[in-house]
Each structure stands twice: as structure tokens, then as C-alpha cells.
Image: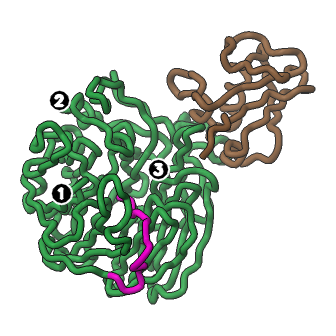
């Protein structure tokens, strides 16, 4: 029987939750990297035991951790005792060296002035679909890096940050972060990224050049609501079978595109609030999507203090509340943008973590939910893996 | 033998318990101690000072014999007590909540 591994990043460490395919009884391991902020933990689709973690600290900066055995042992790539014995010149101690390419330049600051690009942390790690040593990193201040040596060294794909619109990008409340990286499974030259608050961008040449793809977005909180950039996109998602269909949870508004992001239309429909952070797609149904409505951008908790996942089986517009097993009163948690994931078992499993430290799991596509754990530190990210 | 006291998070990162002992073969300065520390424990590179500018991270401080040397020249000789190992070179993460 297949197994499921759920990788959870929190404000004070990482946790690994495992279960068999029934997804009823869970084992919890951790905290790994206790006391550090773990923004994201994600495994390679080629080798699920190859896992990358972004470990950060306001004191000591960015650390990249890697496991080659499914999360039992971790190391900072390029600094293990065996690697230090060799004299092959490979990067040592540079797994946390994220240096912008060329002159970093400036972007727009909160007050409208220009502000230098400054690296702060890695928000998201996206392993390649084909090579476990190849991994992308989305960072704050917004830029895209890649490593082709298992995280030992990193190079910026600077065509994104150096786009003409860069000086107009600005930080959202959480900082100016590149938080989503989607790799087109059918076209290795095509990738999408999303940045708060700049918008969504696409490359069709493997990351060398990028273009903003925000036509159709409307954001009342910026001077020109339909500007080319400046939109606070919170998350985008795709189903691997339909890479031209994209779904977006924007600061306000849930959107979809059917042309690889060239145009977007709103599909918020009957949601009780179209503010929120995560959005994800069912593993087997490309028009079934999930969001977690949040009351507003100043009240980061669910409407009516009821924690409800909303599911649309029509790719948006028509939504149903999923409440079975979720708290329906006095609930004031948030669900952050990287804190939802699906597994590829049948039926599809759906997982999300909250700022209150709960990780909820559904083994029936969202019809019912149970907490795997209730009292972790605030959850920043959740990623599900299916293991043979 | 020079003794270095790391803050708890960096001990965990470097996989060490207690103080770190280093041999510094050149003049004993803040820079030479940090250089040797990062050579022995490359996972610490970038955590105390920036990879490129080599500037101390804002919330990290260096103390010697009860004195804060964080703003002193990195190339000034450290006291004999540090070079002999009778007093440790102390690296501290600022108390700033969190």
C-alpha cells in the first residue's frame, strides 16, 4: 500500500507527518531545526526521498537543508564531513549564498520611493520535474534562483528581476516575496512565478526572459487598478494535465486563465469572501479547485469565525463550503499561501495547516476533515508526497 | 588553542556541543578567528557575516573578555587571553524576542 508523507514548515521548526494510504493513523516526527523558521519543505518528484528545506532566521540569515533519506538525516549541501574531505573545488559552505546577479538595482518601497533589492530569505523551493539535483528557489526580495548541484550553490535567473517593470514592484505586507513557482510539465521551457506585490510572470525560454501576465487583474488598492504590475498575487496553481489553465488567489479575487496567463477572469462567484491565500487543484480533476476564504486583508481569520474550505468542481464561479470536521465557531486562524497541498492517491487527499498550529487532512477530496496535529507552531507551509 | 562560544542555534547548525576549539596560525584577530571558524564549519558561512561584504550580521555581536568588539576593527589583535585560550571568543545573537 502506498504511503503519504506530509512536510510541514512552521515558525519554530519542521515536522514530518506520515501515514499509510488509508490516511487515518499518523506518525509525527520533529521538530527538525527546532527554533528556526521553516518557510518551505518540498521533495523532488523524481526522488521523493530527496527533500529540500528553507530554514531562516532574523539573526543568522538563510540556511538550505537537504535530506537524501526522506527527512531522517539533514545536511547543509556542500558541508558534510565527507564533502569536506575532498578537494574537488566544489562549493563549500555556499548553500546559503544567494547573491543577486550584477547590480541589484531598486524597487518601489512602501512610501513610493525607490529601495535597493536586499536578499532576506527563501520563501519557496521548487524541485525540477526531471532532476533531483536541480531546484529553484523563490526569494525575498523577489528573485528566482536555481541550483543544479543539489543546493550546494545558487545562481540567479536574473532576467526576471531585471525586467523593465522591476522598479515598479513593491512589497506586500509580508515583504516582496517570490512565493510561487510552477513548472509546465509539458513544456520544459515554460515556467510561471508569482510575486507579492508585482503579479504573475511567465518565461517561455527556460528562465532567460520573462513577461508580466496580469491582464484582467483588477486591484483597487493600487493607483492604477489594471496596471501591468503591482498586483498582490497570493498564489497560483495548475493541474499537470492542463498547464495552460491557471488558477489564482489574489489579495482579493479568485481568478482563472485558460491561455497560460495571457488573460484572466474572475471566478470568485458565491464565495463568502474572495480574500485568501492558498489555492490548489484536485490531483485527478483539473476543474476541481480549493480555496480558504478569509474575512479581509486586515482581519486575517475566516468569515463568521467558521473555518471553511471552499471547493469548486467547475473551475470556479460555483463554490461549495466544506465544513465537516472543521471548527464552525470561535475560529480565528489563518491559512497561509503555501500551507495547502494535495496528494495523488484515490480519492485525492487534501491538506492544510493553520497559523494556530493545526494540520487538517481530508482523505475524501475535502468532504470531511480531521486534524493530524493540533498544536504545532504557526504553520507556514504544507507539502504532501505519495511514496511507493 | 582558541575557544569560541557559539549561540545555541549555531551550535546545532554546526553539530557541536559546547565550546569550539580552533588553531589559528596567523595573528589572532576577529577576522582570523572567524575565517578559521568558517573553514572548519562551512555551514556557518553567511550566518555571522555576509558572504560577499563580510559585514557582521546586524543581530550578531562579538564579545571578548567582557568587551563588545562588534564595532572594532576586524584586524586588531585580540587580547593574549584569547590567543592562549584562557578566555573565550563569544558570539552572541542579540536578545530581540521571537
Residue at the image position 80 percent from the left and 47 percent from the top: B17
- Distance from label 2 to label 1 (Cα)? 25 Å
Chain painted green: A
* Front-most of residues A142 and A154: A142
Residue A191: say if magenta: no
Chain painted brown: B
Task: Look at the picture and state if A335 lies above or below A118.
Answer: below
Query: Residue B88 at what x, y percent from top left?
Result: 84, 29
Chain letter, disc 1 residue: A
Pointer 3 with pointer 2, Cβ within 8 A: no
Q: Tell me the magenta residue range.
A: A323-338
Quadrant where the C terminus of chain A sits is: bottom left
Chain letter, disc 3 residue: A
Residue A385 is left or right of residue A79, and the answer is left
Residue A332: say if magenta: yes
- The reply to whether residue A45 is in sight is no
Task: Look at the picture and state if A195 lies above or below A6.
Answer: above
Label 1: few (<14), some (14–19) or many (≥20) C-alpha neighbours in 10 Å: few
The secondary element bearing badge 2 is classed as loop
Q: List the residue tagged with mark 2.
A: A164
Pointer 2 with pointer 1, Cβ within 8 A: no
Q: Main secondary structure of the magenta part?
A: loop
Task: Look at the picture and state if A304 lies above or below A110.
Answer: below
Residue B66 is left or right of residue A373, and the answer is right
The secondary element bearing badge 3 is classed as loop
Q: List the residue tagged with mark 3.
A: A150
Residue A354, by quadrant, is: bottom left
Residue at the image position 27 percent from the left and 29 percent from the top: A108
* Front-most of residues A160 and A1: A160
The secondary element bearing badge 1 is classed as loop
Amino acid at each position: 500500500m502506498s504511503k503519504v508523507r506530509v512536510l510541514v514548515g512552521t515558525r519554530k521548526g519542521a515536522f514530518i507527518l506520515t501515514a499509510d494510504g488509508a490516511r487515518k493513523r499518523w506518525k509525527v516526527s520533529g521538530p527538525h531545526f527546532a527554533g528556526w523558521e521553516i518557510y518551505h519543505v518540498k521533495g523532488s518528484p523524481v526522488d521523493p526521498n530527496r527533500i529540500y528545506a528553507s530554514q531562516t532566521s532574523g539573526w543568522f540569515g538563510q540556511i538550505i537543508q537537504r535530506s537524501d533519506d526522506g527527512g531522517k538525516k539533514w545536511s547543509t549541501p556542500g558541508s558534510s564531513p565527507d564533502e569536506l574531505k575532498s578537494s574537488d573545488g566544489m562549493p563549500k559552505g555556499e548553500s546559503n549564498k544567494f547573491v543577486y546577479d550584477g547590480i541589484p538595482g531598486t524597487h518601489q518601497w512602501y512610501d513610493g520611493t525607490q529601495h535597493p533589492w536586499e536578499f532576506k530569505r527563501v520563501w519557496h523551493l521548487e524541485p525540477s520535474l526531471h532532476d533531483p539535483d536541480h531546484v529553484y528557489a523563490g526569494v525575498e526580495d523577489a528573485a528566482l534562483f536555481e541550483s543544479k548541484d543539489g543546493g550546494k550553490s545558487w545562481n540567479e535567473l536574473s532576467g526576471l528581476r531585471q525586467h523593465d517593470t522591476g522598479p515598479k514592484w513593491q512589497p506586500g505586507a509580508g515583504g516582496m516575496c517570490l512565493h510561487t513557482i510552477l513548472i509546465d510539465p509539458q513544456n520544459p521551457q515554460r515556467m510561471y512565478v508569482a510575486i507579492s506585490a508585482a503579479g504573475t510572470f511567465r518565461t517561455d525560454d527556460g528562465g532567460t526572459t520573462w513577461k508580466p501576465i496580469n491582464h484582467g487583474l483588477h486591484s483597487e488598492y493600487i493607483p492604477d487598478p489594471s496596471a501591468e504590475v503591482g498586483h498582490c498575487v497570493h498564489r497560483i496553481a495548475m493541474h499537470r494535465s492542463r498547464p495552460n489553465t491557471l488558477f489564482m488567489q489574489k489579495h482579493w479575487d479568485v481568478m482563472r486563465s485558460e491561455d497560460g496567463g495571457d488573460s484572466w477572469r474572475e471566478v470568485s462567484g458565491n464565495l463568502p469572501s474572495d480574500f485568501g491565500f492558498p489555492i490548489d487543484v484536485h490531483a485527478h480533476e483539473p476543474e476541481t479547485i480549493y480555496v480558504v476564504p478569509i474575512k479581509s486583508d486586515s482581519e486575517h481569520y475566516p468569515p463568521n469565525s467558521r473555518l471553511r474550505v471552499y471547493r469548486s468542481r467547475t473551475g470556479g464561479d460555483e463554490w461549495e463550503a466544506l465544513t465537516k470536521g472543521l471548527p464552525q465557531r470561535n475560529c480565528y486562524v489563518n491559512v497561509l499561501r503555501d500551507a495547502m497541498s494535495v496528494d495523488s492517491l484515490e480519492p485525492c487527499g487534501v491538506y492544510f495547516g493553520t497559523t494556530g498550529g493545526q494540520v487538517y487532512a481530508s482523505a475524501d477530496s475535502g468532504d470531511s476533515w480531521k486534524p493530524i496535529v493540533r498544536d504545532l507552531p504557526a504553520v507556514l507551509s504544507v507539502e504532501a508526497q505519495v511514496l511507493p | 588553542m582558541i575557544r569560541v562560544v557559539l549561540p545555541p542555534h549555531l551550535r546545532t547548525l554546526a553539530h557541536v556541543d559546547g565550546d569550539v576549539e580552533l588553531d589559528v596560525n596567523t595573528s589572532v584577530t576577529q577576522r582570523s578567528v572567524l575565517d578559521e571558524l568558517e573553514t572548519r564549519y562551512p555551514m556557518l558561512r553567511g550566518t555571522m557575516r555576509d558572504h560577499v561584504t563580510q559585514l557582521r550580521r546586524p543581530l550578531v555581536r562579538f564579545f571578548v573578555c567582557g568587551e563588545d568588539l562588534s564595532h572594532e576593527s576586524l584586524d586588531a589583535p585580540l587580547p593574549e587571553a584569547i590567543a592562549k585560550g584562557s578566555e573565550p571568543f563569544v558570539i552572541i545573537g542579540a536578545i530581540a524576542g521571537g
